[in-house]
Amino acid sequence: MKSQFPLFRKRDILVFLVAAVLAIAGFLQWIPKSGTPVAVIEQNGKEIRRVELSSITQPETIVLEGEISVTVLLEPGQVSIVHSDCPDQICVNTGALTRPGQSAVCLPARVSVRIVGENNSGIDGMTG
């Protein structure tokens, strides 16, 4: 005996498939884009140096002088603030940065170190 009201009709399945495709496409937008990680070092709002982390073969130290001295260490695949004359040492305790989106900031020295992807547009997010 055939039911008078089937559980799913053809158009119900079509609507479900379209909704599933839209949901998957929306989810894929949130997956971080891979790219060559680039360390960006700034002091007083000005870019001091931009380095592709994959191009580093030997550890390199950068000393940023000012009222508060900050030492940045570039190593293969990572960057970190290893010394600061600031009192709280939050920037030093942040540790090594290895992935795009990570950052370390020394507010008293006005120094920031962040990692961006090669294809990073500089936009963190957007609402419509």
Image (cartoon, rainbow, N blue to C red):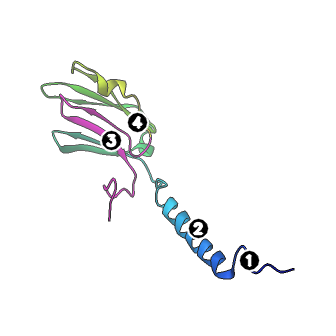
Q: Residue at x 36, y 28 (%)?
A: 94
Task: Please identify, in this view, whether the residue under mark 2 or under mark 4 is nearer the observer.
Answer: 2
N-terminal of the pair, mark 3 or mark 2, is 2
Secondary element at tag 4: loop
Q: Say above or below: 97 vs 128.
A: above
Q: Nearer the viewer, residue 70 or 51?
A: 70
Image quadrant of residue 63?
top left
Magenta stretch: dominant secondary structure: loop
Task: Please identify, in this view, whether the residue under mark 3 or under mark 1 is nearer the observer.
Answer: 1
Q: Say above or below: 42 vs 124.
A: above
Q: Are marks 3 and 4 in contact (CB under 8 Å)?
A: yes
The kind of residue tagged 2 is: Ala
Q: Which residue is mark 4?
A: 97
Q: Residue at x 72, y 73 (%)?
A: 7
The Cα atoms of the two marked residues, 3 and 2, are separated by 36 Å
N-terminal of the pair, mark 4 or mark 1, is 1
The kind of residue tagged 4 is: Leu
The kind of residue tagged 3 is: Arg
N-terminal of the pair, mark 3 or mark 4, is 4
Task: Please identify, in this view, whether the residue under mark 4 or under mark 1 is nearer the observer.
Answer: 1
